[in-house]
Image (cartoon, grey):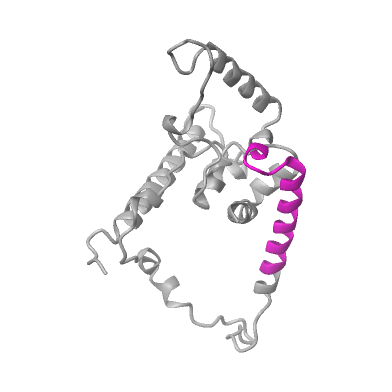
Amino acid sequence: EDWGYVLEALGQKARWSAQLLAGVMPQDIERAFAASGKRLFPFKLQEVRSECTCPDKINPCKHVSAVYYLMGERFSEDPFVLFQMRGRSRAQLLADLAIQRRELLAKRAREATPAAGLPQPSADGTLPPAPAAIKDPSRWWTYNAALDPGLVVITPAMEGDTGLDEAGPLPLAEDARFPEANQRFLDHLKGQGAGFSTQALATAMAAGRDAPAS
């Protein structure tokens, strides 16, 4: 059941699916587990337990430390061992992910087909009135219930995770007099995007702070 939630989260993001199906472990794979309320890696030191029969009082002792070192070396050679330790072999994970991805694409294709009874563009191309939530974007951020802090998992942003990074180099005009102008412009755009994301997260988490208990 737990893996069902994780596979659903993995299938939602095309980049994760493509990298895993190509045999590459995404750097931000922990986000898929966090989105489903699970964890791939230990969240705190207390979750890592080790014992050894040697007389050393320090834990981890040198024997356990050697085991950790060998495990890290093995993970570097084949990151999919992490999934196997969580109950899914590489072959099983990739097969399940391929099925999940096909089902998701088929669902999206069905949803993209105009349904009977829904307003369609007129003959002259005029579109029907937009839903209220689109006319008033603030309605997307309305949430009146209090949030349990224990349900929130925040993961750091990874490289290649922004739209600008995904788009690749932009064909901006260059001026030899200002060689750093383009990079400063892109850094400014990324900074603006990061600021908006942080503000949106803070607004969403604080929306139900003063709501009465039910």
* Quarter that holds the N terminus: bottom right
> As drawn, is 188 to the left or to the right of 89?
left
Per the rendered image, the range of residues in magenta is 83-108
Residue under the image location 74 percent in, 45 percent down: 21
Q: Where 203 sits versus 56, above or below?
A: below
Q: Where 179 sits versus 97, above or below?
A: above
Q: Where 132 sits versus 47, above or below?
A: below
* Residue 52: percent from left, percent from top: 53, 18
The image quadrant that residue 122 belongs to is bottom right
> Residue farthest to the bottom?
117
* Residue 156: percent from left, percent from top: 46, 38
Residue under the image location 57 percent in, 82 percent down: 126
* Quarter that holds the C terminus: bottom left
Helix, strand or loop: magenta stretch: helix
**Is 135 within the magenta?**
no
Can residue 177 be seen by looking at this rendering? yes
The number of numbered badges drawn on the structure is 0
In front: 49, or 160? Answer: 49
**Is 106 within the magenta?**
yes
* Residue 42: percent from left, percent from top: 49, 35
